[in-house]
Image (cartoon, rainbow, N blue to C red):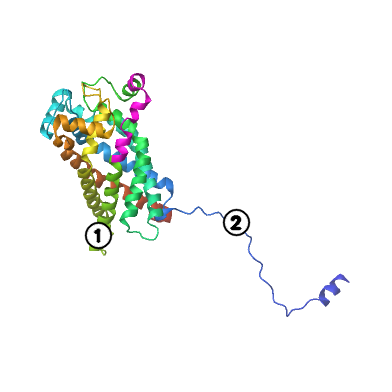
Amino acid sequence: MATTEAAKFKNTDLLAVAQPPDYHRQVAVLPSHDGLHFWQFMVAGSIAGMVEHMSMFPIDTIKTRMQVLGSCPIKSVGIRQAFGSIIKSDGAAGFYRGIGAMGLGAGPAHAVYFSVYELCKETFSRNHPNNPMGHAAAGVFATVASDAVFTPMDMVKQRLQLGSGSPYKGVFDCVKMVLKEEGFRAFYASYKTTVLMNAPFTAVHFATYEAAKSGLLGISPDIASDERLVIHATAGAAAGAAAAALTTPLDVVKTQLQCQGVCGCDRYVNESIGGVLGTIVRKDGYIGLFRGWMPRMLFHAPAAAICWSIYESGKSFFLDLNNGNIDNRLM
């Protein structure tokens, strides 16, 4: 009987309706600016910063020695004198005294530096990707954040760079003695000067880099992909040299504040920027504000070329990884 009723209501003219597939909700994690995640900017920046600073460390040591004034035993005037004094007092190893502090500070600081820059650049230049003011403003925000991370280890690094005449045996001995004798505040004695120096430095650096990169890419767009590494290196070198030349006086003040009271160097009662500038001018004239400008430029031009090349290469690696291009090449 049941079979008969079923046959009675069966209509072969009706079309079968396709059933929808099972619904599975997916939560997509979207990449941020340039198709990369925040942590990928941090990793690329950290590697770039460590390679940059540690590879150029000997030149940075010469610059520090040249900028130290007063009664410090190493009162060098030029690159040759600074080089000779380091060899005489510490040997070749003296060029790398303090490199451990640089390694501890440069990685985290540059991770913050580049990640904050990329996020701010996306915000400030959203509708105008080639806006130099947006790039400059993003650079200022980046340096304020990164200097808060780097300044303590930078102070330790510069005190160790004064050579064997300084009272510190190494990085951790320096940290311990400074905390005991001068307090935590000493690690940030130069922070305001560092920010005031690095803000214009970074503004000029990033604006020049982005403009130079855009200009070089526009010259030969057909071969830009094949020569991208050369373009990043050239733009970085130009940006580093220009920014270093403009900010040398404030870098001298920073070095003076970080090294005061060590190795017989002057200790400042008035630690304001104006007070230190006035002391330098009275003792050494206006030329004293530009001590170390040559090694500073020799440091920042190749350092920026190295840093930007590695950073952009890191970004390209992560972009390929996100797009599956690396997996495809490995298969």
Numbered circle sitting on residue 143: none
* Corner quadrant of residue 252: top left
Image spot of residue 233 (x, y percent): 24, 50
Lower sequence index among marks 1 and 2: 2
Answer few, some or many: residues within 10 Å of disc 1's Cα (few below 14, many 20 plus, some between 14 and 19). Answer: few
Q: Point out residue 87 in the picture as x, y percentages from the top left corner.
A: 14, 27
Per the rendered image, the range of residues in magenta is: 177-196
38 vs 197, nearest the viewer:
197
- Circle on res. 25: 2
Camera sees residue 274: yes
**Could you tell me which quadrant the N terminus lies in?**
bottom right
Dominant secondary structure of the magenta stretch? helix
| Residue 276 belongs to magenta span | no
Q: Is residue 168 above or below residue 280?
A: above
Q: Amino acid at mark 1?
A: Gly
Q: Where in the figure is residue 182, as x and y percent of width and height?
A: 33, 21
Q: Is residue 111 visible?
A: no
Q: Secondary structure at mark 2?
A: loop
Q: Amino acid at mark 2?
A: Arg
> Residue at the spot x=25%, y=27% of the render?
259
Q: Nearer the viewer, residue 160 or 74?
A: 74
- Answer few, some or many: residues within 10 Å of disc 2's Cα (few below 14, many 20 plus, some between 14 and 19): few
- Tell me, for residue 215, which label it has, or none: 1
Q: Is residue 189 magenta?
A: yes
Q: Is residue 193 above or below residue 4?
A: above
Q: Residue 218 is drawn in which quadrant? A: bottom left
Q: Is residue 29 above or below residue 76?
A: below
Screen quadrant of the C terminus = bottom left
Report x, y in % for residue 203.
29, 48
- Disc 1 or disc 2, which is closer to the eye? 1
